[in-house]
Amino acid sequence: MEHEFWHKRWQRDEIGFHQGTVNEYLYEHWTELAGQGTDAVFVPLCGKAHDMWWLHDRGHPVIGVELSEIACKDFFEEAGEKAKVHPGEPFTVFQHDNLQLWCGDFFQLVPDDLRHIRLVYDRAALIALPPEMRKSYVEHLTAVIPDGTEILLVTLDYNSGEMKGPPFNVTNEEVYELYGEDYEITHIRSNDLPRDNPFAKRRGLLNGASESVFRLIRK
Ligand SMILES: C[S@@+](CC[C@H](N)C(=O)[O-])C[C@H]1O[C@@H](n2cnc3c(N)ncnc32)[C@H](O)[C@@H]1O
């Protein structure tokens, strides 16, 4: 996906992926990874996900990475919070307490940037990318997070003949192909979305869809 594609989506406010509330799988499964601890969390391709406030409120330092400056600004403004802005290259950092949004390209991150990270939350990041980019995404993520980092990954699968992504369909088999070599994988659960689910209905998915949740540990 070209950067321009996402910039346009934000400029036109075409952000159907944005959830104004905490994601149900984050809410239900986060303690299985994090316990009651407050380790630092990385949120790739973070948008303006409310989930980051939830993680922050639980005491986690958070670093999100997001291409769109609109998303970064809106994230703080919509919460009525002021962020300090540290302009820079390749990232401009928006900061409030220990919650930072790094505005720039995920693929520009280097391992030193994420050396304190112990947890990753991926909702609508892997599945935002077309098949040819997903391998590079996982390779880059694996290169920049420390060993032992745990990831909560949420995926979506559907009949790819029925709609054009994003979000793209990622099968559970693909998760094992992409992460199997470098991660221990636990498939926590899958949840069927029936054809009359609002998302399936909006996108014309006559066979519905299915979401899956994984816990991955970087070996
Ligand atoms: C489908 S949205 C998901 C946002 C968020 N995870 C959520 O749950 O709402 C994908 C986001 O990734 C951002 N994005 C796409 N490519 C990126 C890249 N290379 N680096 C950083 N952000 C990127 C887009 O601007 C978009 O906000």
Image (spheres, grey):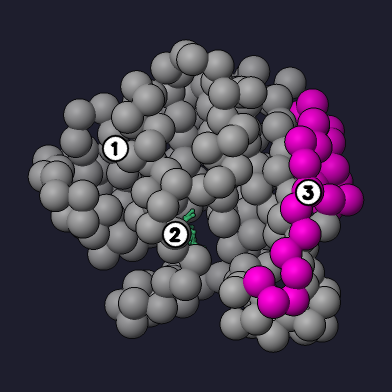
Residue 8 in the image: x percent, y percent? 38, 79
* Element carrying mark 3: strand
Q: Circle 3 sits on which residue?
A: 190
Residue 112 in the image: x percent, y percent? 43, 26
- Would you say residue 158 sits in the magenta stretch? no
Nearer to us: label 1 or label 2 = 2
* Structural crowding at the residue carrying mark 2, measured as other residues with C-alpha within 10 Å and reported as few (<14), some (14–19) or many (≥20): few
Residue 100: name its quadrant: top left
Nearest to the observer: residue 21 or residue 164: 21
Q: Amino acid at mark 3?
A: Ser
From the Cβ of disc 2, is ligand 1 less than 8 Å away?
A: yes
Residue 7: name its quadrant: bottom left
Label for residue 19?
2
Q: Amino acid at mark 2?
A: Gln
Residue 110 in the image: x percent, y percent? 47, 35
Label for residue 100?
1
Q: CA distance from mark 3 to mark 1?
A: 31 Å
Name the side, left or right, on which 119 lies relative to 13: right
Magenta residues span 172-197
Q: CA distance from mark 3 to mark 2?
A: 19 Å
